Image: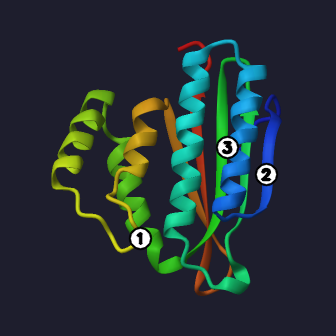
Amino acid sequence: MKKKSEKISFSYFGYLNIEILENILVDTREYLKVNFKDNKVSKRIYVVVVEALENIIKHNNVSVLEQNKIKFEINVLENSCKLLFANKIYCNEENNIKNILTQIQNKSKHEIKELYKITIQKAKISDKGGAGLGFLEIAKVVNKIDYKFDNINSNTCEFILEIEIARNS
């Protein structure tokens, strides 16, 4: 998915828990403050980082031995930034994630906002503490969402989420 003209400007690879998440968010905020003059773009990037990493923590089901080793990158292009998130999931969750993201990819910004309102009104908090808003929060502020799944073994896949945010918006 990465193009030759991209440069990785900020990245993390390792385990993720609440304490590490807090550190990543502090470091991300500082990185954005120093490297992005456009506060609107900076806020969009930060919203995506928060939502994506919180989703990883909330929805992680992989056993403690394989627990939550993730990859996170901010890749800077001339006119946009790409954020990459990769984590392990059970392969049987792949279709559910695909259905959600396919539905979002085919909607306009207005339709995403309407779907968000409807989801809030009908929201039921899951056992994991989510209401199904994470991908919608992301979709509201980005230009493009790509994803793929790589099989690790018969039970475990790597879910790779790539988000593009225009730098001139």
Tell me which residue sits at (53%, 37%) in the image: 47
Mark 1 to mark 2 CA distance (whole Å): 24 Å
Q: Quadrant location of residue 39?
A: top right
> Which comes sooner in the sequence, label 3 or label 2?
2
Q: Which mark is residue 128?
A: 1
Q: Quadrant of the N terminus?
A: top right
Left or right: residue 103 versus residue 85 is left
Q: Which residue is mark 3?
A: 25
Tell me which residue sits at (32%, 58%) in the image: 131
Mark 3 belongs to which amino acid? Leu
Looking at the image, what colour scheme do you see? rainbow
Nearer to me, 88 or 125: 125
Q: Residues within 10 Å of mark 1 (few under 14, many from 20)?
A: few
Left or right: residue 15 versus residue 88 is right
Q: Secondary structure at mark 3?
A: helix
Placement of 123 over or under 63, stated as above or below: above
Question: Can residue 22 be seen from the camera position used here?
Answer: yes
* Contact check, label 1 and label 2, Cβ < 8 Å: no
Mark 2 belongs to which amino acid? Tyr
Q: Residues within 10 Å of mark 3 (few under 14, many from 20)?
A: some
Tell me which residue sits at (54%, 55%) in the image: 54
Placement of 5 over or under 145, stated as above or below: above
Image location of residue 68, percent across then percent down: 67, 70
Q: Quadrant location of residue 108?
A: top left
Tell me which residue sits at (69%, 33%) in the image: 29
* Contact check, label 3 and label 1, Cβ < 8 Å: no
Q: Quadrant location of residue 21?
A: bottom right
Q: Which residue is mark 2?
A: 12
Image location of residue 160, percent across then percent down: 62, 57
Q: Secondary structure at mark 1?
A: loop
